[in-house]
Amino acid sequence: RTLASHIARGAIRVHEYDEADMVRRYPVLRDLKRNPRLQESEEFQRGTHSLAWGLHAEALNAWYQSLERKPSFVWCFEDDVGFSGSLETLVDIVKRDCGDADLVTADIKLRPSEAWWWLDVHSTAFA
């Protein structure tokens, strides 16, 4: 079946949001928007990227809070994830080999590069 048919029958629900939605829910994001590191980035200056593109935890929480019935488990794939093959196989492998892991990744660094946009983007409460 196609993705559209799953969405049409309610088997898959799509949560749409934008930066304005996130700022309404989390007003402190107005301050983050003014972060010099983000303001200097070409993508933010051009308007091709926004806080909604980069702040995954806030976006996921906005979706989760909008649900009447809360799922006990959620899979989240970022838009730059690449995988060839059966998604069912991937899920089975992760369930089998990763147990109750909170994060599954092929490459993670303990300290990101100084060039990473989000390195110092946080509210004063988390400084």
Image: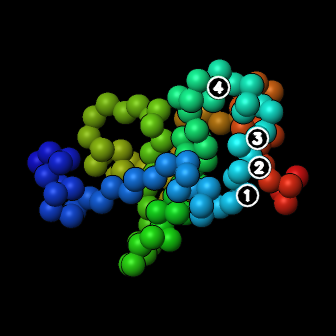
Label 1 crowd bin: few (<14), some (14–19), many (20+), radius 10 Å: some
Q: CA distance from mark 1 to mark 3?
A: 11 Å
Residue indicated by mark 2:
31
Q: CA distance from mark 2 to mark 3?
A: 5 Å
Judge left or right: residue 45 versus residue 18: right
Camera-nearest residue between 25 and 83: 25
Amino acid on which disc 1 is placed: Val
Q: Are marks 1 and 3 in contact (CB under 8 Å)?
A: no
Q: CA distance from mark 1 to mark 2?
A: 6 Å
Q: Are marks 2 and 3 in contact (CB under 8 Å)?
A: yes
Camera-nearest residue between 9 and 80: 9
Q: Secondary structure at mark 3?
A: loop
Residue indicated by mark 3:
34
Q: CA distance from mark 4 to mark 2?
A: 16 Å
* Res. 63 in view: yes
Q: Are marks 1 and 2 in contact (CB under 8 Å)?
A: yes
Q: Secondary structure at mark 1?
A: loop
Judge left or right: residue 80 versus residue 85: right
Amino acid on which disc 2 is placed: Asp
